[in-house]
Amino acid sequence: MTDTPKQLILGLPKGSLQESTYALFRRAGFHISSSSRSYIPRVDDEDIQIRLIRAQEMSRYVELGMLDAGLTGHDWIVENGSDIHRVCELQYAKQGRKPVRWVVAVPENSAIREPKDLEGKRIATEAVGIAQSWLDKHGVNAKVEFSWGATEVKAPELVDAIVELTETGNSLRANNLRIMDTILESNTQLICSHAAWADEWKRAKIEQISMLVNGALAAESKVLLKLNVQDAGLHEVVRILPSLHAPTVNSLSESDWHSVETVVEEHVVRDIIPQLKAAGAEGIIELSLNKIIP
């Protein structure tokens, strides 16, 4: 009788983060595919089963052991009060790598300027617990109601203020709302159940995923530069090149030529390539990277 192969049940966020998560995992080496109606995507790793779950619910299912691990926001872990193991932070979001924010927003012309002005007011939000904790901290009594969506359009006709998640603030400004206060900053986190972390095989698989995904994030804004230079220009080329540690320098078959390579931030390449060329560099090649593993 053969043993059933072990598998890790991994939850990935369905919704606004889904496509950016798929792209991140692709760079990490995991190719995921699914139909528009499927909640069970396919992945080219027999050790993993994936479930698409909304980020709002992820930490609850991980805590209950229905998922071994998952990606969700710090905010939803706080909102659910989930007892889980945080494996690592993953600095990415729908539109960039900055943390997202839960903010208190009010109409542009509202007289509400500080927390005490919300006394007795109505607030709409999807994160009722986060909003209520903020009110309690400021000693304010207000009515917090759950919002099923399109929260920005509810003020001022239906509610006096909203507590909403924002990445850029553009949607709030488009609806004539101003931010009064920031309640919580949040980023994506890889989490797992305590039972999965205690399981040697599952922990090793989770750590593998963590290493590869973080490696993909580390490489996101960087490129590999390769070039050749003669002895006379080597010192100046090395001085110009920023690097993770120090540029790699190898001698070529011609005794006075060297091959130099290093990893640099992509945004500096346009500035340093002309400097490298002026210093005597030749055959300059810029290559994109999938992963950088420290």
Image (spheres, helix red, strand yellow):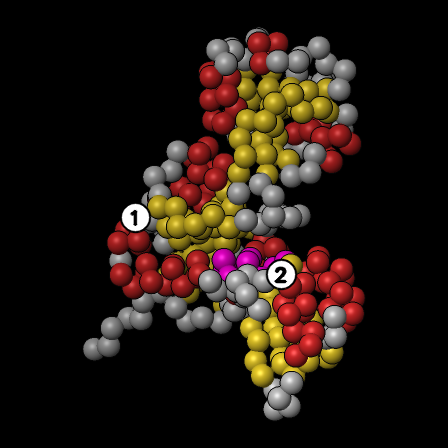
Q: Residue at x 74, y 70 (%)?
A: 279
Image coords of residue 285 (percent x, y): 70, 75
Up the image or down, 87 lies above or below 34; here it is above
Q: Residue at x 28, y 71 (%)?
A: 4
Residue 272 in view (yes/no): yes
Up the image or down, 54 lies above or below 181; here it is below
Disc number for residue 151? none
Q: Residue at x 54, y 15 (%)?
A: 143
Q: Is residue 27 left or right of residue 227?
A: left
Task: Looking at the picture, tell me which residue is in the foreground, 217 or 249.
Answer: 249
Image coords of residue 129 (percent x, y): 47, 26
Q: Mark 1 = which residue?
A: 194
Q: Residues within 10 Å of mark 2 (few under 14, many from 20)?
A: some
Which kind of residue does numbered mark 1 sit on?
His
Boundaries of the magenta span: 212-222
Image coords of residue 257 (percent x, y): 65, 84
Task: Looking at the picture, tell me which residue is in the foreground, 26 or 19.
Answer: 26
Q: CA distance from mark 1 to mark 2?
A: 41 Å
Disc number for residue 242? 2
Local secondary structure at mark 2:
loop
Image coords of residue 98 (percent x, y): 61, 43
Q: Residue at x 49, y 58 (%)?
A: 214
Up the image or down, 270 lies above or below 166; here it is below
